[in-house]
Amino acid sequence: MAKNSIRVRYAPSPTGHLHIGNARTAIFNYLFARHNKGKFIIRIEDTDTKRNVADGEISQLDNLKWLGLDWDEGPDKPGDFGPYRQSERRSIYEPLIQKLLDEGKAYESYRTEEELAADREEQKARGVMPHYEDEFAGMTEDEKQQAIADAKAKGLKPVIRFRVPKNHDYNWDDMVKGPLSFNSDSVGGDFVIAKRDGMPTYNFAVVVDDHLMEISHVFRGDDHVSNTPKQLMIYDAFGWDAPKFGHMSLITSADSGKKLSKRDESIIQFIEQYRDLGYLPDAMFNFITLLGWSPVGEDEIFSKREFIKMYDYKRLSKSPAKFDNKKLEWINNQYVKSSDEDVVMDLALRQLIAKGNIPTNPDAKTVEWARKLINVYKQQMSYMAQINEMADVFFHEPEQVTGDALEEISNDTAPVVLKEFAKRAKELQIFDKVEILKTIKAVQKDTKIKGRKLWMPIRIAVTHEMSGPELPESIELIGREKALEHIEQTLKQID
């Protein structure tokens, strides 16, 4: 590897959709590479074939692209270090596993899953932390060979276990956590590096891939700390230099303080779900980058280019990052406010269509009406799916006026205002917000009723709500016919 060459990777498993935590890992590696003018690589870790899902890889890559990430090498962008799927690298792993077997650093293990489970239960009963115990311990070489022959005679296929050195300390200076040390006796005994079908396990394949792909730095989640000593053992066994490791803090719920769990359905955790709700990709990139990393100063809204320029891994936090959904909504709202009208229009229109509030193939008149509606709510929306709830009054006939709204218009002046406004609204040649505003002011002039007693009866009668966007715009969007119907219904109710 060239001196000071920066090469980092994001290595997802195609076992599901892109999770917030995995997206953060990808973004932090991406920013580190781009800031240092290095290479960002995508590698698919698909050796766990039982958990792989259809289109899992496509989903991962598609959502990374949606977030605005690009990479220099990957399964869809071949480079000099491929293949970039572990399932296609078996011919690379097998001779290396054989090398460890030949050197006595690994061995075949015939212990069945049932026997291993029984061992764990027995260890728990003794109050011992469950671990693997060498099945050949105490045997002579002849006894060992006989045990292997008996296992083969039963048709058992072995796993390959790595022989863990006894009482050896493995140390590294973590780029996030600082100096860390693990004793080899704490890792649970000799661990599996190849499964019964010959497919390598994660802790073996990741070392081989990172070494052969010349990965210089590895940024990953805190849950991988316990894997690191096992991987350092593999590096030592081959005489390879390990990359620099940095383990990022956990992401916790701002509400519960507990680690973000995929089983916690109170928090939306997958990028695709945020896409479906109409979040903006730049806003998601911004929010995720602030999960465990902080810029200098108090500002929180930055472009991707700005993040790349100022990114410093030394500002990665050791403390858990709080996932605050309200903050995400605030950040996304800032992006919605400043976004191009056509971008907001496209995303919000899709939400209206998905909900059935707008036809699937709307005509030009409907599209123009929808554009006006969306612009009315643009400043308020935290994400586009909110348009359906915010604008519900424009799609569903309101119920009778009740509660505080009914009390608000239960006075002598409300009918006067409503009758006068309805009379003038019927006569308008152009029914738009400009003419509607003029009409409301004319009602004020003629009735001498102003302020809350003027505006609130009209708003409540037409929309059955006490708050909302600018009243003339709301009335224009509801339309003359429905507005007059609603006023007539309200007058009957309060009369």
Image (spheres, rainbow, N blue to C red):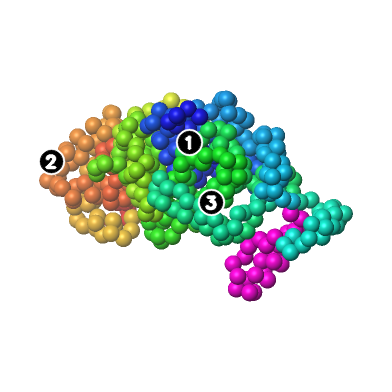
Residue farthest right in this picture: 153
Q: Is residue 124 magenta?
A: yes
Mark closest to the chain's N terminus, 3 or 2 = 3
Magenta segment range? 109-135
Which residue type carries mark 3?
Pro
Q: Residue at x 60, y 54 (%)?
A: 165
Mark closest to the chain's N terminus, 1 or 3 = 1
Residue 380 picture location, percent across and down: 31, 42
Quadrant showing the C terminus: bottom left
Residue 32 picture location, percent across and down: 40, 36
Residue farthest bottom in this picture: 126
Q: Which residue is mark 3?
A: 229
Q: Residue at x 68, y 62 (%)?
A: 133
Mark closest to the chain's N terminus, 2 or 1 = 1
Q: Which residue is mark 1?
A: 216
| Residue 473, above or below 140 | above
Q: Residue at x 37, y 52 (%)?
A: 318
Which residue type carries mark 2?
Lys
Element class at badge 3: helix
Q: Nearer the viewer, residue 30 or 334?
A: 30
Q: Nearer the viewer, residue 287 or 217?
A: 217
Which residue type carries mark 1?
Ser
Badge 1 local density, few (<14 within 10 Å), some, or many (20+)? many
Question: Real-space Cα distance between discs 2 and 1?
Answer: 76 Å
Q: Nearer the viewer, mark 2 or mark 1?
A: 1
The image quarter in which residue 331 lies: top left
Q: Nearer the viewer, residue 254 or 39?
A: 39
**Residue 373 makes an appearance in the image:** no
Please give left or right for residue 492 compared with residue 63 in the image. left
Question: Real-space Cα distance between discs 1 and 3?
Answer: 17 Å
Q: Which residue is mark 2?
A: 445
Q: Nearer the viewer, residue 70 or 43?
A: 43
